[in-house]
Amino acid sequence: MLGRMRILTGIQPSGALHLGNYFGAMLPAIQLQDQGDAFYFIANYHSMTSLTDAGLRRRYSFDVALDFLACGLDPKRCVFWKQSDTPEHTELAWLLSTVTPMGLLERCHSYKDKVARLGAGDAGAVNHGLFAYPVLMAADILLYGANVVPVGKDQKQHLEVTRDIAIKFNQMYGEVFVVPEPRIREDVAVVPGLDGQKMSKSYGNTIEIFGEEKATRKKIMGIVMDSRGLAEPKPDAEKNLAIQLLRLVAPADVARDWEDRLRAGGLGYGDLKKALFEHYWTCFGPARARRAELATHPDYVHLVLREGAERARAIGRPMLDRAKAACGLD
Ligand code: ADP
Ligand code: TRP
């Protein structure tokens, strides 16, 4: 790609972040912050389509900020803010919605899946925001002229919608928007949860990044393993859930050593799980200390987000003005 990358991604404030979020989304975002101009925002407007508790939204938004800052997101090296502090997103979303064909949104899997889950009969639960979600997401991206948008596979279609909307707007009103490239994180492995399925809040199988010590130890010690005897060799050791998680949180040679011991036989699952917990706890130790420190300075965190919003607006506002002028709204 020619020129400097402008990287943007949004994070929904929808609960405590877990190891899947960390290895699948946060770490890649944190690593990307030096490879271009990075824009990361807390998508609290988006969260309104599924979460209706104001207090929880406030708390989760703050918690996500703490989590990201503690894990190494540096507000000096990227722009980090809360979506609702840049209301230009919703204004641009209106302009974009007038060039968005209904069919484009009706085809979105994420919308269709949610409708199916909420039950077709319960019309009240399926709100317009859920339907229009991809248009707001397009506004988030186009407002900043982002050309690289790192997301998980589940967001691929939404990015295609963004591209379609940008192209359509440009055709109708002139070349205003950069058509962004998705950066689907194909290379990031799916982190398994406590039950071996994909780790996800909706499956209740998560290990939180900053979980409470006793509760997390209990969760990890509770992982169900197969019934093979202790002494039995385990030729499929690499498939063992604790080994897979250990590979993420322990140094490579240490994880390999545990894997070899499991393969050879004679290693008890209890000892393996204990090691997993210890390495998980050590892995996030420095971040945990930073998070505890940040939590005692909420004013600092709010200031970071406010300053981030100002920097974001300095880019987003002129883009919105350009789009409005192109539509004859000046
Ligand atoms: P959840 O499934 O817990 O609701 P989200 O969908 O909010 O998580 O996840 C936000 C991002 O975190 C996703 O786009 C995805 O990139 C990443 N992610 C979530 N779970 C995993 C996982 N188990 N493995 C890898 N990445 C994940
Ligand atoms: N929809 C994304 C998710 O659920 C979050 C998001 C909102 C986003 N706006 C965005 C991601 C813009 C990338 C770019 O994970």
Image: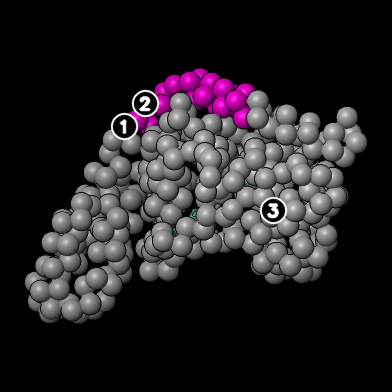
Question: In this figure, which residue is indicated by the disc labeled 3?
Answer: 162
Q: Which amino acid does label 1 sit on?
A: Ala
167 on left or right of 56? right
Q: Which residue is drawn at 64% across and 56% down?
A: 159
The image quarter containing residue 131 is bottom right
Residue flagged by tag 3: what amino acid is it? Answer: Thr
Q: Tell me residue 85's x, y (percent).
A: 66, 29
Mark carried by residue 274: none
> Relative to residue 1, is residue 78 depicted above or below?
above
Q: Disc 2 vs disc 1: Cβ atoms closer than 8 Å? A: yes
Q: Does the residue labelled 3 lie within 8 Å of ligand 2?
A: yes
Q: Earlier in the sequence, mark 3 or mark 1?
A: 3
The foreground one among 145 and 18 is 145
Residue at 67 percent of width and 50 percent of height = 179
Task: Name the element at disc 1.
Answer: helix
Residue 71 in magenta?
A: no
Tell me how far mark 2 sits from mark 1, CA to CA: 6 Å
| Whole-percent x, y for residue 129 in the image | 75, 51
Image: 136 above or below 205: above
What residue is pinned by disc 2? Answer: 293
Which quarter of the figure has residue 175? Answer: top right
Kindly report the distance in space between the C-alpha atoms of the residues bearing marks 3 and 1: 39 Å
Q: Nearer the viewer, residue 168 or 237?
A: 168
Q: Mark 1 points at which residue?
A: 289
Which portion, as a residue range, is magenta? 288-312
Q: Decide if ligand 1 comes within 8 Å of the CB at mark 2.
A: no
